[in-house]
Image (tube, rainbow, N blue to C red):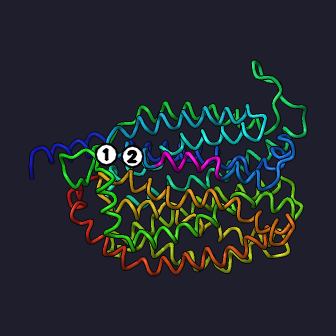
Amino acid sequence: MSTTTEAGKAQSIHGYGSNSYLWYVIILLTLASTLSMVDRLALNVMIEPIKRDLGGLTDTQFALIAGIAFTMFYTILSYPAGWIADRYNRRNLMAGGIMAWSVMTFLCGMAGSFWALFFARMGVGVGEATLGPAANSTLADYFKPGRLPLAIAIVSSAPFVGQGLTNIIGAPMVDYLESVPNVVLPLIGEVYSWQMVFISLGIPGVIIGLLVLNLREPARQGRLNQDSVGAPFSVLKAFVLERKLFFFLIFAAYLGLSIQGWGLFTWFVEFYIREHHWTKTEIGLTYGSIAMFIGILGAVTSGAVAGWMVGRGKVDAPIRIVMWGTCALIPLGILLWTVPDGWMGIAILVPVTWLMAMPSGLIMTTLQSICPNELRGQIIAFYLISVNFLAYTFAPLVPPIVSDYVFDSPEVKGISLALMSIFTYGGAAICLYLCLKHYRVALEKAKAWTEIRSDAV
């Protein structure tokens, strides 16, 4: 082996590889990802106050703010962010993005009209587009295949941590602010309850961004060409087309899972307020606790089990585990929205949350495991564009559209989401099963470059 390659390995191991530092990286990236989720999900506990204070918005108008306003620039800029992550310093990209979306979240708290909030949410999407490609590419350079699933699973538990914090802290905070006179801030003036929440969320991001800026950029592992810096779009296109059945099936499966998951994230609290007549604080604390603790357990245990299985030769474990969980979600997803008793629904929510938490980390492990270093950021961006754009856009929209225009009532979103479960989870389970053999073939092809990084941390 060449001296240059040996030096690169030594730098990766001795410069970046202590267990304490790796845990620090995981914790910090988890905090950053959690903040991004809180910024996205905070809207969901403030639906009625926002609709009221912005002149009586409809559910569909609110869904446009929660969906396409964010996803438009989030999607447009995901590929440029991935392209940059494959070529330049990923730490700087993440830090800049975190601080940018935090400023835009602060500006959401200044919005006084539908369009002002719509455009501010677009700005949040611009900043958040940077984190996914850069963070997952970075983690893949820190951890060898047997440890990568757990590392990514912890960071990918952020949607559930964020959902938990949003409901545990955000819902009671909104209830409290709704019960007292509007806050008057220096230089800003009087603000509504939901505006105060956004302003409060914008500040921590600057601190987290500065901490990320002080991380050490890891040496890149597993390149197709050790002398190359990134790869052009033509290489990405050829890579995807050579594995087109794998990408079609895995993206179709995760699109179904994501639409159903974000539909739940968006409408579950409001559904309990309208259907079961719980207060925002009651459902916020209950749902938030389940989302946080059960969601973390689901993500971490699935990552640990996948890593254990991969280490024992079950190389398709990241997809197989998600397939098993998705099959269980079909009946549970129907019952969750149709049982007559609120506490019975909460009992069903526990296994639903556990199973929903499994895919988020394992999809990143799946994609990173088949890609050379030069394409890791771009392939994550390709996933975000192909799956997350559609999921973020349509998940908030489909339930109110079905309720408003099919059932002609805003009170039947539970039935809409129960019907969606049949198609989204059923279709996802089929696609995952068909994808298994194509994933094994893709992993076999990936040995050409994964062997280069066999000694990585």
Q: How far is the residue under mark 2 from the one under mark 1?
A: 7 Å
Quadrant location of residue 274?
bottom right
**Main SS of residues in magenta:** helix
> Please, which residue is most extreme toward the left here?
2
Please tell me how crowded label 2 is: few (under 14), some (14-19), or many (20+) other residues with Cα within 10 Å.
some
Q: Nearer the viewer, residue 88 or 323?
A: 88
User: Which residue is at 40% across, 38% downward?
Assistant: 91
Going by the image, does 373 lie left or right of 170?
Answer: left
**Rendered image quadrant of residue 451:** bottom left
Residue at image x 49%, y 42%?
28
Given residues 292 and 32, the one toward you in this image is 32
Q: Residue at x 42, y 45 (%)?
A: 80
Labels 2 & 1 near each other (Cβ < 8 A): yes
- Residue position marked by numbered label 2 in the rendering: 22
Q: Tell me where residue 132 appears, x and y as whole percent.
A: 47, 49
- Which stretch appears magenta? 68-78
Residue type pointed to by label 2: Leu
Position above or below: 209 against 266? above
> In the rendered structure, does residue 193 fall within the stretch colored magenta?
no
Dot 1: what SS?
Answer: loop
Q: Quadrant of residue 169?
A: top right
Residue 17 tag number: 1
* 10 Å crowding of disc 1: few (<14), some (14-19), many (20+): some
